[in-house]
Amino acid sequence: MNTGKLTTGFCIAALGLALAACEPIKSDQGYHFDAEQVAQLQAGVTTKDMVQEIMGSPSAITTFQTEGDSWYYISSKTEHLAFFAKEVTEREILVVKFDLNDVVSELEGLDLTAGEEVQIVERETPTGGRKLGLLEQLFGNLGRFNQGGEGQ
């Protein structure tokens, strides 16, 4: 067997593996929307229990709201190459708002363009209390141990 052909075959196989590794990894996360289900929801008619039955559990529920709850059904598609950060390529959000009687008051659809970047603050919150010096940290517990040893 010719070693040149073997080397060429090995190089082609290695190149094929390298190119296959460059394929982005795609994933779907969250709620999978069904247009027929969403069409069943009607403002002023559909109750919270009916929404639960039709759509299932929401992805998120508002925590603080005075005029009724809002349920969020969120779907995202992401992709990334190898070790790079994930990039959201598509996002759909259905916001179901309820009135105080737990009846749907409004349906709102959002997409990726409705999102906003949140800036993370890197500050540290100061803690209360007294700061101990090096000697207080090293020798602060001397003499504080129980002498009796029996449950004291």
Image: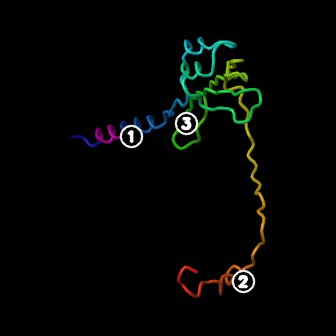
User: Which residues make up the magenta segment?
Assistant: 4-11
Asked whether 70 or 134 is in front, the reply is 70
- Of tags 2 and 3, which is closer to the observer? 2
Q: What residue do we see at 54% from left, 18% from top?
A: 54
Residue 105: quarter of image: top right
**Residue 56, numbered label:** none
Q: Is residue 27 above or below residue 103?
A: below
The answer, for residue 90, to whether it is visible in the render is no
Q: What residue do we see at 74% from left, 52% from top?
A: 122
> Disc 1 designates what residue?
14
78 displayed left or right of 123: left
Q: What residue do we see at 36% from left, 37% from top?
A: 13
- Of tags 2 and 1, which is closer to the observer? 2
Q: Is residue 10 above or below residue 49?
A: below
The kind of residue tagged 3 is His
> Disc 3 designates what residue?
80
- Of tags 1 and 3, which is closer to the observer? 3
29 displayed left or right of 115: left
Q: Is residue 97 above or below residue 134?
A: above
Dots 1 and 3: beta carbons under 8 Å?
no
Q: Is residue 16 above or below residue 104?
A: below
Q: What residue do we see at 34% from left, 38% from top?
A: 8
Mark 2 is surrounded, within 10 Å at the Cα level, by few (under 14), some (14 to 19) or many (20 or more) other residues, namely few
> Disc 2 designates what residue?
135
> Which quadrant is home to the C terminus?
bottom right
x and y percentages locating residue 14 in the rendered image: 38, 40
Q: Main secondary structure of the magenta part?
A: helix
33 displayed left or right of 111: left
The kind of residue tagged 2 is Leu
